[in-house]
Image (cartoon, rainbow, N blue to C red):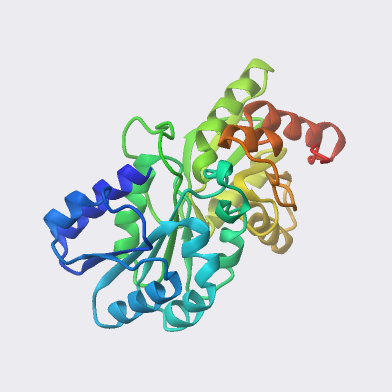
Amino acid sequence: MRNAFASEVTALAAADKRVVLLSGDIGNRLFDKLKATAPGRFLNCGVAEANMTGVAAGMALCGLRPITYTITPFVTTRCLEQIRVDICYQNVPVIIVGTGSGLSYASLGTTHHSCEDIAFLRVLPNMTVICPGDAVEVRLALRAALQHPGPVYIRLGKKGEPIVHASPPPFEIGKGIVIRPGRDVCLLSAGTILPVVMQAADRFTEKGLSAQVVSLHTVKPLDEALLAEAFRSFRIVVTIEEHSRLGGLGGSVAEWLSDHPVTAGRLCRIGTGDRFLHEAGSQDDARAYFGLTPGGIVAQTLAMMETGEAHVDRR
């Protein structure tokens, strides 16, 4: 994902002289082509993310289109006040890009995990939150964000994520993408977990169930028309994300559902638990711990269908 981001931002900077990339002490070699293509429009701001955010807000007020970029918790949690006051309060078009989101940096411990960032940022007025599902969606999301008049947060993985889309699909902020139609279960995926969700859909097929897969890449604003149709048409609607079940896509859909209670379907939220991960290991290890595997997704969904209880992970 980050390679796709670097390639796309380089192309966009070549086409638009307003585009400036501000990095929080990361990605120097990754952006060598950008530095050659757009001299002076890559700024390494060092380990000073709050200052970087304020600088980006000032640039946006001067008519530039700044993009801030570093590891997710450092570009979000560390400078939340500056995002709130400098960017969102003034409603300026800064694009905030967090790389290595969720459990991508599982081996580096809790300081590098980001399972709360969607919750933090989606409650800020004027903020748009986009969680691309693969590298194809990363490119499309960045293009759409550059056309958006207000703040945008784009949540990326790290590297090596599988490509889901064989060709670029229609992409619009606030509109989900139906990747695979189905009849029995609707799986709403946000972000880098999308390839795992596709594998879970295959597991449902093996069990005689037809699963619809949707890349609900925009967590704010939600695709309300898609949600209304899903809850009318499916017995179970499942949100899946590499983020806490609290406050992310699942929390957003639960809030929407509380305002639209006359539906046929029930909501099953799958994400990380309300606790820190103290064990070190790979991203796959961390996903397995929280049940974010094809088998875990199927098990939690079937538990909801059979007993009304989805959270089978009690650790």
Q: Position of residue 249 (x, y in %)?
A: 61, 53
Q: Is residue 216 above or below residue 287?
A: below
Horizontally, is 52 left or right of 221 in the view?
A: left
Residue drawn 33% across the image and 68% down it: 45
Horizontally, is 247 left or right of 163 in the view?
A: right
Q: Nearer the viewer, residue 75 or 262?
A: 75
Q: Position of residue 138 (x, y in %)?
A: 37, 47
Q: Is residue 134 above or below residue 247?
A: above
Q: Point out the residue furthest to the right here.
A: 307
User: Does residue 11 show up?
Assistant: no
Q: Position of residue 260 (x, y in %)?
A: 70, 60
Q: Position of residue 100 (x, y in %)?
A: 47, 48
**Quadrant that contains the C terminus:** top right
Q: Is residue 259 above or below residue 80?
A: above
Residue drawn 42% across the image and 32% down it: 164
**Quadrant that contains the N terminus:** top left
User: Does residue 109 show up?
Assistant: yes
Residue 49 lies in what quarter of the image? Answer: bottom left
Q: How many marks?
A: 0
Horizontally, is 284 left or right of 22 in the view?
A: right
Q: Is residue 175 above or below residue 198?
A: below
